[in-house]
């Protein structure tokens, strides 16, 4: 091979040029956390090269093909060279990727304990000795473990972790790691802020948008193994054959990534698409209709996951329409699904306009007595808090209260109440707070995480669901940092004991750069972001203050909606005397749904954590907080603090500019302008409104509102998204 | 510089790898016709290198900055090297890019005639002699001409054209080259089949999606200089200040690409957002309101283009609501816009449910008498045919009939009636047919193109509008080949005399490859595609047979809609005796709106071109066509031919597989499956239905329908897009 200097120079330029191109493409964020493959450490690079010189990959079905594709592509991106991958082991191999049954007896025995630990979906990444030689081994019991192991291996490399003497034995702690898409058949997304639904029903089944595979790949890379395609406010049409063949096409794309498809089942489907005149779950025609329908579904999708059901909630039909119970409804569907190993995931998000008790209590009151009555392929899905995905809620009292029922945690990844896709809010911080919460339902250390992963009560199955924030936007999630919420949700579904800081660091390194001068301050910025949104929207336990319908911006004054518990005034109860919802025994007594140890803490304003103060207490405007500041001033200063936290976030981001591309910087910077504008809007609107009750001046240190209350009340947003 | 062999090898691999990445990114089609930069001919490459060794670029404002950015980026992609670009000319320069006023006197004089030819938007690309040395010159009178010239220059290179002795003097033949977006404020798009609206109103003005600039760049690269952002079925809210500041942000992005923003004006806006109780165009409060509104608009957008108006059409409000005329309405708005050089584009797409005459006649009847009455900043926009964007229509009789009124051609790029974004239909073939049509309104050679470019009647301004097929899909247009319709529309707006084959070839070379083994057969496939869709949907002059509302698929049997002229039965008039709409003097006499020379041809079935036969004639089922086949058999065989043409297109595409990436191949291939399925559906449904009238057997050679008529009538598509 001979090269002239100019040819060489041209290759040089071309190589650089091509990198520039890749970067500019990547800056749109389409590649998510799978994008950044830059390794700056030469010693690490050398180590990786040595480990991957010669790879034996024991191939097989489509999942293993994807694993191999990922490995080859990933190593190319990281090492800048084609890998030498063989179907059969040989003496030169430095790395093996093979399932247990593809290893020799010696290794199988040596790793017996590991294989017993990792179950169906776990993996081993381990430096092992074969014939006196070190081999880097990725192994698993099943195909999907290999795929997960390969993704993990590549992520470790991309984060510049040393693989020398690696001994990583990992398995997911939760069985069902699920996304819930609130996607409608017309491609609008309820509470969707990143464009529209990825599912192009019109062109399915023939046209499989290449994006479907990219979606599956991203999910598999963080261990998500289930997806409910349709809105919980369900449309029965998705269960007709015209749509089932489209669903089957999606399932075909997702299957080689270990992802099962679920659908939402509209309880009245037997009437709407079945021609029956009832949907009574005890009616034999209804039962037969669902049995036939389920059989049909499994003809299209042999590994169909099951049904997610919102019944008798916010106008959705359900068994109560026929005088039956949630148990009757769930078990009827579960019976139909049982022969196919399908699941029913029945949502506990219920509250009634005819029930005068505190909305926060109703789900517990209704569901807890059913504990033990559901069939064993029924899971009950519970939102993280007792109201509805607010910036902060105490954990839902149902967690720990139903020992004989697997409870699925429902987190919201899409930011319905947290600034849509315009606000940078790192949600794993919120998730962590809930998962770490002590329930005291079985003594100390009975955390919510232990309820969810089934370890507290030895449930046979466990699950976590995240309401997706994914849409057709080029970067999938609207805000580049909202990708971290998708990523972080997936990581916590895999391991609910991870810390949010670990997740932030992983995500930053995988997405942007390993440079700690960037990673450390931005991690700190992410960590503070959730407290910021609580402060500028609903500090000190306030909740549900948003405007009606679209939930965009503040509307604490709204009091004229048909259902009392839809009005913000129901929640803040501000009056001349004070503000807050008394949920102690002197009020709604919602605290009684918690374990006595917790209830006791919540019941006294002195011991109640200040972040939940107005969630549980109605207190006078001059009530003194621990720091001696009176409540009115404290509320105002918290709002102000939220605004200042956003300003600080902007300042941190500006300083990090030099570590990333201009486009990467600028996209976030523009969104931060919106966040700051809206943080001020929330502060101004809420405080001007509450001031009409407190009758007090704003405290020093608070920036005065730019407009008057009437202005903020006059704002209308008929086309705010996601409604 | 020293390189070891292994380092060299690594760079090699890296370079190749990076190319592979770029390709895989490009295969999603995001880069449009700006993507393919591969030059295979070494001699051509050498020539280009020589021409671009040292470039003097006379910089300036933001348009010139964009031109320079394009040139540098484009040359990098083509030549694989950084270009040497200087702000000042020097003796080593091989290329100059400078406006006329940046050239020396000698060159200015030498090129005087050229500069006079090219006007404000044209450009010169010419090999000139400077001090005895050959210099490649790109010049223009104005900034925008430089940008257009640079795009043209790069396109020539990408198509491997020799630049030796180049002498290209080009200027657009049409002033206003416009896209019409039928985008709603909730981001749905009326008749949009490529996702949803690009305009993310929620995040504007702060967040300027990087895609806005990519959109502007793509448009500028083909000379489009105007965009109407909103649906002609208009929403007055876009004229409120909350939206105008968002519009201004878009205008700021588009301006450096020479693109002006237009909005649709809802005629009743003074009532809906102005608080008036009338929108009468002669009412002084209404006049004042519009004057103030226009002044406000220009405060936000100093170079605002003007208003596009759909009035008194399909339920839209208009001057006739107050007993006034289209002239009253248009001139009122024109008067308000005049001080700012703004335009009114008033649509002539009108037909009334209370007018019993042939719908095809109504626009002509209503508008032609107004010729000469509109103010000189009013243009009247006319759809290409007298009904509504059917797969084939004769040209609109208004073309040529209003010598004193600039008529804007309205083409539909989005495929409302031509298979949505699932069917590969190359529309420039349709556009060309209309533009080449002889009107005989001023003797021979009075083509529609000459009406549109203003040359026939010496109009002071000229325009062409295309209803955009652009949405949030990764590839912008849903179908990769629908990009060719956007591209082709732009090219014809620049030069309405271009042939569709030239356009197809340009687009294929710029998008896929210069390899003629790919280009030639695929060009042929594109060319036949339009005739295919006519054949399998509405052959022999049939029209308006689609299903109601969404216009998806066949619905020739629909006859129960509230307005008679919305029913397909109104158009085909099939009965026991025959089929077709008699528009001759024995029928509606619509032919009388054409010049006598044309009317005469259309009036006799023997001379009427067979492609318009049933548009103008109701003929018996056994009427003999020129080839001796009776009408019933001919219709059936035309439908069959359409299906077979799609099969042939698929076969051609399969053979071209090896010249492109698998992803590029497969994406189109999947869509072709839909096209074939739907072509058969159209054939089967229409023929089974028409058979109920003809009572005749299907002719030999026709594949028999797979289902019965009741099946096709039973199909329902509540969520078909674009409705």
Image (cartoon, coloured by chain):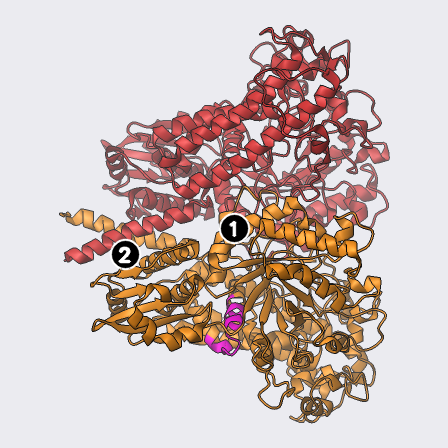
Chain colours: A red, B orange
Residue span colored magenta: B487-502
- The percent coordinates of residue B469 (x first, y second) are 58, 62
Residue that numbered label 1 is attached to:
B252
Q: Which residue is mark 2?
A: B86
Q: Is residue A112 above or below residue A574?
A: below
Residue B676 as seen in the image, left or right of residue A45:
right
Name the side, left or right, on which A52 lies relative to B213: left
Question: Mark 1 — on which chain does it sit?
Answer: B
State which chain disc 2 sits on: B
How far is disc 2 from disc 1 in space, using C-alphas? 28 Å
Task: Identify the residue shown where x is 72% and y is 40%.
Answer: A233
Q: Position of residue B690 (x, y in %)?
A: 76, 77
Label number found at residue B155: none
Across and down, in percent, residue B575 comes to 82, 81
- Judge whether A152 appears above or below A373 on screen: below
Task: Locate residue A563 relative to residue A656 in the image: left or right.
Answer: right
Residue found at x 53% / y 42%: B207
Q: Earlier in the sequence, mark 2 or mark 1?
A: 2
SS at circle 2: strand
Is the N terminus of chain A in the top left, top right, bottom left or bottom right quadrant? Answer: bottom left
Label 1 crowd (10 A; few <14 / some 14-19 / many >=20): some
Q: Is residue B709 magenta?
A: no
Q: Main secondary structure of the magenta part?
A: helix
Relative to B698, does residue B294 appear above or below in the rendering? above
Identified at 58% across, 63% down, the residue is B179
Q: Is residue B644 visible?
A: no
* Of B258 and A232, the residue lying toward us: B258
Residue B689 occupies quadrant: bottom right
Pointers 2 and 1 in contact (C-beta within 8 Å): no
Residue A49: x and y in percent read 26, 39
């Amino acid at each position: 091979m001979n090269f002239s200097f100019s040819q060489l120079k041209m290759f040089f330029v071309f190589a650089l040029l091509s990198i520039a191109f890749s970067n500019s493409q990547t800056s749109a964020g389409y590649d998510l956390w799978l994008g950044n493959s830059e390794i700056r450490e030469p010693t690490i690079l050398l180590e990786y090269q040595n480990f991957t010189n010669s790879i034996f990959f024991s191939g097989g079905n489509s999942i293993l093909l994807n694993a191999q594709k990922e490995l080859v592509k990933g190593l190319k991106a990281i090492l800048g060279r084609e890998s030498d991958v063989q179907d059969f082991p040989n003496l030169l191999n430095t790395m093996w990727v093979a399932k247990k049954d593809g290893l020799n007896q010696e290794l199988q025995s040596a790793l017996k304990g590991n294989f017993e630990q990792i179950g169906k979906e776990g993996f081993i990444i381990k430096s092992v000795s074969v014939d006196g030689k070190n081999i880097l081994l990725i192994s698993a019991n099943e195909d999907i473990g290999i795929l997960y192991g390969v993704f993990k291996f590549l992520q470790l490399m991309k984060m510049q972790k040393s693989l020398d003497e690696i001994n990583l034995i990992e398995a997911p702690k939760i069985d069902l790691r699920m996304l819930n898409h609130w996607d409608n058949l017309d491609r609008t997304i309820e509470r969707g802020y990143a464009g529209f639904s990825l599912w192009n029903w019109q062109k399915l089944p023939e046209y499989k948008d290449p994006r479907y595979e990219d979606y599956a790949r991203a999910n598999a890379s963080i261990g998500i193994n289930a997806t409910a395609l349709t809105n919980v406010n369900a449309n029965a049409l998705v269960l007709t054959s015209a749509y089932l063949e489209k669903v089957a096409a999606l399932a075909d794309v997702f299957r080689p990534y270990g992802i099962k498809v679920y659908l939402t089942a509209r309880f009245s489907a037997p009437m709407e698409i079945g021609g029956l005149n009832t949907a009574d779950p005890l009616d034999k025609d209804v039962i037969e209709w669902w049995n036939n329908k389920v059989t049909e579904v499994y003809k299209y999708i042999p590994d169909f996951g099951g049904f997610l059901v919102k019944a008798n909630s916010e106008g959705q039909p359900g068994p109560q329409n026929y005088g039956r119970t949630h148990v009757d409804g769930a078990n009827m569907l579960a019976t139909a699904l049982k022969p196919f190993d399908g699941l029913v995931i029945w949502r506990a998000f219920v509250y009634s306009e005819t029930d005068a008790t505190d909305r926060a209590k109703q789900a517990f009151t209704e569901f807890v007595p059913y504990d033990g009555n559901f069939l064993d392929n029924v899971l009950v899905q519970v939102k993280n808090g007792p109201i509805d995905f607010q910036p902060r809620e105490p954990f839902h009292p149902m967690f720990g209260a139903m020992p004989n029922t697997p409870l699925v945690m429902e987190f919201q990844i899409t930011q319905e109440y947290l600034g849509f896709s315009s606000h940078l809010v790192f949600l794993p911080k919120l998730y962590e707070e809930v998962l770490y919460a002590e329930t005291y339902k079985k003594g100390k250390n009975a955390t919510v995480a232990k309820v969810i992963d089934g370890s507290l009560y030895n449930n046979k199955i466990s699950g976590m669901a995240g309401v997706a924030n994914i849409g057709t936007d080029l970067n999938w999630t609207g805000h580049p940092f909202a990708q971290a919420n998708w990523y972080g949700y997936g990581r916590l579904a895999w391991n609910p004991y991870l810390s949010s800081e670990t997740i932030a660091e992983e995500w930053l390194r995988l997405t942007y750069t390993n440079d700690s001068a960037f990673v450390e301050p931005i991690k700190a910025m992410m960590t503070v972001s959730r407290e910021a949104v609580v402060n500028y929207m609903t500090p000190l336990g306030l909740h549900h203050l948003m405007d009606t319908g679209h939930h965009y911006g503040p509307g604490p004054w709204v009091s004229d909606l048909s259902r009392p518990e839809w009005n913000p005034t129901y929640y803040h109860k501000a009056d001349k005397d004070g503000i807050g919802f008394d949920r102690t025994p002197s009020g709604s007594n919602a605290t009684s749904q918690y374990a006595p140890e917790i209830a006791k803490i919540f019941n006294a304003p002195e011991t109640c954590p200040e972040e939940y103060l107005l969630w549980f207490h109605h207190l006078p405007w001059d009530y003194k907080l621990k720091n001696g500041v009176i409540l009115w001033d404290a509320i105002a200063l918290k709002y102000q603090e939220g605004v200042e936290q956003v300003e600080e976030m902007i300042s941190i981001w500006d300083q990090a500019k030099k570590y990333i591309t201009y486009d990467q910087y600028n996209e976030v910077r523009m969104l931060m302008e919106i966040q700051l504008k809206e943080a001020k809007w929330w502060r101004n609107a809420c405080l001007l409104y509450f001031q009409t009750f407190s009758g007090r001046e704003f405290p020093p240190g608070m920036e005065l509102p730019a407009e008057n209350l009437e202005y903020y009340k006059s704002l209308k947003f008929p086309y705010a998204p996601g409604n």
